[in-house]
Amino acid sequence: MPEQWIYLDGEFVPPEKAVISVFDHGLLYGDGVFEGIRAYNGRVFRLDQHLDRLYCSARAINLTIPMSKEQMRDRVVETIRRNGLRDAYVRLVVTRGKGDLGLDPVKCPVPTVFIIAGGIQIYPPELYEKGLRVVTLATRRNIVDALSPRIKSLNYLNNILGKLEANQANVEEGLMLTREGYVAEGTSDNVFIVGDGVVATPDLHLGVLAGITRGAVLEIAAAQSIPTEETTLTLFDVYNADECFLTGTAAELVPVVEVDGRRIGEGRPGPITKRLLHAFRELTRSEGVPI
Ligand code: PMP
């Protein structure tokens, strides 16, 4: 077994020493923020965008991350380097820190920071060829005015309830709707459709995470002169789309071929999806912060 080193509060420690207190409010209340970041071929993909999102999430919950973005950037890169990885999935977590049993964050003076560099594969490779089946979930996405889905917080129960439903339905992912019934996102990915040659995805104002992969795909499409739209989508739009796919750091870009028992397009990954997937893979291997 190769050694693994975890960054925890200023030190690199082996996994058995990478432990945090049961009084940490990240654990007691899901009070904290995180990022899932990926490195390909010796470069960290869109690291600055991930850090910007992390610091925005932290600001939204009034959590002061105890280091600058530049220091955090160095620590992420150093964690991957220490683990001898060139391709990696990195989990970066900042919690409110240790407090007492009450929920008041004022009692938590020092945030906890940890970084784990490992691997991830959420779908088997053949699903990228064949496409996924998804269902619409009864669990609605958190409403913006209660807990904004723009905050990538440690409180993922909304998504987990959705994932439990998808498991129950024996499909790989599910679509979550907004309270109003518009299409929001998957439990851990953004959703796109292609119709009449236009690539469309729910607007951020509807209450979805501003996915880094989502942003990259919108850029790639624009660079290839494929029209894009950030808009309001209904299930009707999805059922009648020519193509559908999901995006996320872990999932990358994965085609969807069936939604609620309706075949999407020809029932196999469509030409624009394939083109974007190919271009996304090229991009991940060609840009990024060197490790
Ligand atoms: N939506 C949700 C709810 C997620 O958890 C994720 C994964 N971070 C995404 C979308 C995709 O975001 P990204 O492309 O930044 O990984």
Image: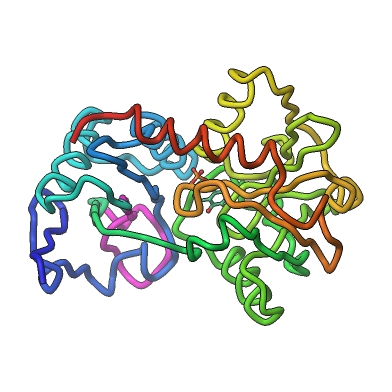
Residue 274 image-quadrant placement: top right
- Whether residue 62 is situated above or below residue 7 in the rendered picture: above
**Which residue is located at x 52 percent, y 39 percent?**
213
- Whether residue 73 is situated above or below residue 188 in the rendered picture: above
- Residue 161 image position (x, y, % from top left): 62, 72
**Is residue 262 toward the left or the right of residue 22 in the image?**
right
- Residue 131 image position (x, y, % from top left): 65, 58
- Whether residue 28 is situated above or below residue 276 in the rendered picture: below
Residue 16: in magenta span = no
Question: Which is nearer the eye, 10 or 84?
Answer: 84
Question: Which is nearer the eye, 29 or 269?
Answer: 269
**Is residue 118 toward the left or the right of residue 62 in the image?**
left
Q: Which residues are magenta?
A: 91-108
**Which residue is located at x 31 percent, y 41 percent?**
40
**Is residue 222 toward the left or the right of residue 235 in the image?**
left
Residue 107: in magenta span = yes
- Whether residue 275 is situated above or below residue 246 in the rendered picture: above
Residue 13 image-quadrant placement: bottom left
Total marks placed: 0
**Which residue is located at x 75 percent, y 42 percent?**
193
> On the rendered image, what quadrant is the N terminus found in?
bottom left
**Which residue is located at x 83 percent, y 37 percent?**
195
- Residue 61 image position (x, y, % from top left): 47, 45
Question: Which is nearer the eye, 214 or 148?
Answer: 214
- Residue 28 image position (x, y, % from top left): 39, 70
> On the rendered image, what quadrant is the C terminus found in?
top left
